[in-house]
Image (cartoon, helix red, strand yellow):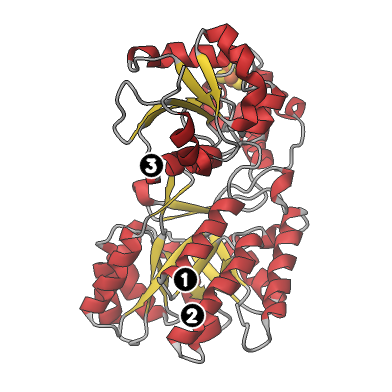
Amino acid sequence: MKIKSPLEVYNYLPRTNCGECGYDTCMSFAAHILDRSAKVEDCKPLVEEAKKDPKIKEKLDELLELTAPEILEVAIGTGDSAIKIGGEEVLHRHELTFFNPTAFFYDVWDTLDDRAIDERCSRVVEYRKFYVGKFLTLDGIAVRCTSGDPKRFREVVKKVAGYGKPMVLVSLDADCMKAALEEVAETRPLIYAATEGNWKEFLELSLDYNVPVVLRAKDLDVLKSMAATFRQAGVKDIVLDPVTDPLGEGLKGTFERVIQLRRTAIAGEDKDVAYPIMVTPIAAWLIDGDEVTKSYWEAVIASMFIVKYADVMIFRSIDQHVVMPTITLRFNIYTDPRTPVQVEPGLRPINDPSPEDPVFITTNFALTYYTVESDLTSGGIKGWLLVLDTGGLGVEVSVAGGQFTASKVKELIEETKIAEKVNHKILVIPGLAARLQGAIEDETGWKVLVGPMDSGRIKGWLENNWPPQD
Ligand code: SF4
């Protein structure tokens, strides 16, 4: 984004403070444009005026260009399952946040039999991993032409399209690619890849079928020159592949090219490299061909480029030892550091509790909540768990910072009507909140017991403390 202050954005807005964008003032809207929690198009008066007045249209276009992300955002697929890649603003997550997680595609190839293709596609579609309150899933399927036969490639691409996932079509042969695009262009697949040898045909295909295209070259000058040619010809959605070649040259070369591309782009020095980056960890071990012993390399290589700066990847292995670490790392790198991971506050019954069972309280910081919830559930403990809105902060920090207070506990007790569900007025607070014991008793009229420091010890603690003797 070229604009750095809300005042600069404000100068482009109607400045009527009409509130149609959902913000009280134009200045507030401008601030949200800068952190990308609002879009310029949400200012309806500006958009409507631009339709009538060419000068306002010019102003709107200028604002859109100035507030566009440094790295172009490219959509693959259509409808609800479409994914966006790129759209990044910074080199380091702590400077703002990363926006679009690296998209993970898993390949099938057209010399596989149909049963094997179905089996691999189903595994991609069905994969779900529960992690910190969310289900993590895989993004799409890459269909590789290994037969060299346009008819077979088209057939397989059609079959895979039936799974409804975004696709990358992989072939250097323009005839094969054309056959596939005739079948599935409207699903907006990413085509891979234009090279020094075939770029003219792929330029035509990308324009004719209006699909995003990957440009592939190890020499960054060649890559940049291809990108400039495609852009000038009218191709908007470009992805760059600087070639992942860990066996040929070692990972150092790939790493350096990726870093150089992204640094130059974010610095705004060269818009011909300001595109999403493709990395293919699969290349590392296919050459040796021993899938069982080499597949872990995909996890190793992918990890490096999830951190820096791959926007899309093609994998071969769908085994847990590759998928689980990479998808977990991706989640952690792409969570917004400005917003703690949190869960909904409220009341959770655990293990079908009765009115005699204890009432616990914890915070809505996701890691704390899921640890406590899992310790209670797996320990077979029946109870009522109150989840306090601390803005996603853990117990110790929120007690110190004033987000975990006696008055907020009172509000939560009232909102959840917990007193109507139990036949006692006893609350168990975390050991780390012990200093609030007296204040909560005074504020709520409930008796407060101080539980253990660690929720893993609740079971043993209950054996000695529940039901209370007096
Ligand atoms: Fe200002 Fe536009 Fe928002 Fe109205 S809709 S408050 S003019 S930014």
Q: Which residue is mark 1?
A: 321
Taking the image as shown, residue 56 lies to the left or right of residue 372, namely right
Instruction: Choose mark 3 or mark 1, whichever is in front.
Output: 3
* Label 2 SS: loop
Residue 252 x/y as whole percent: 72, 78
- Residue most toward the left? 115
Image spot of residue 63 (x, y percent): 66, 35
Left or right of residue 84: residue 169: left
Residue 369 at x, y percent in the picture: 50, 37
Give the residue type that dot 1 points to: His
Give the quadrant of the N terminus: top right
Q: Which residue is mark 3?
A: 377
Q: Residue at x 59, y 50 (%)?
A: 87
The quarter of the displayed image where residue 304 is located: bottom right
SS class, disc 1: helix
Q: Label 3's element?
A: helix
Residue assigned mark 2: 295
Neighbourhood count class around disc 2 (C-alpha, 10 Å): few under 14, some 14–19, many 20 upward: many
Q: Is residue 70 above or below residue 58?
A: below
Say above or below: 152 vs 355: below
Q: Earlier in the sequence, mark 2 or mark 1?
A: 2
Of circles 3 and 2, the one toward us is 3
Q: Amino acid at mark 3?
A: Thr
Q: Residue furthest bottom?
A: 288
Identify residue type, mark 2.
Ser
When the figure is inspected, residue 237 is found, relative to residue 120, above or below; the finding is above
Q: Between disc 3 and disc 2, whose residue precedes? A: 2
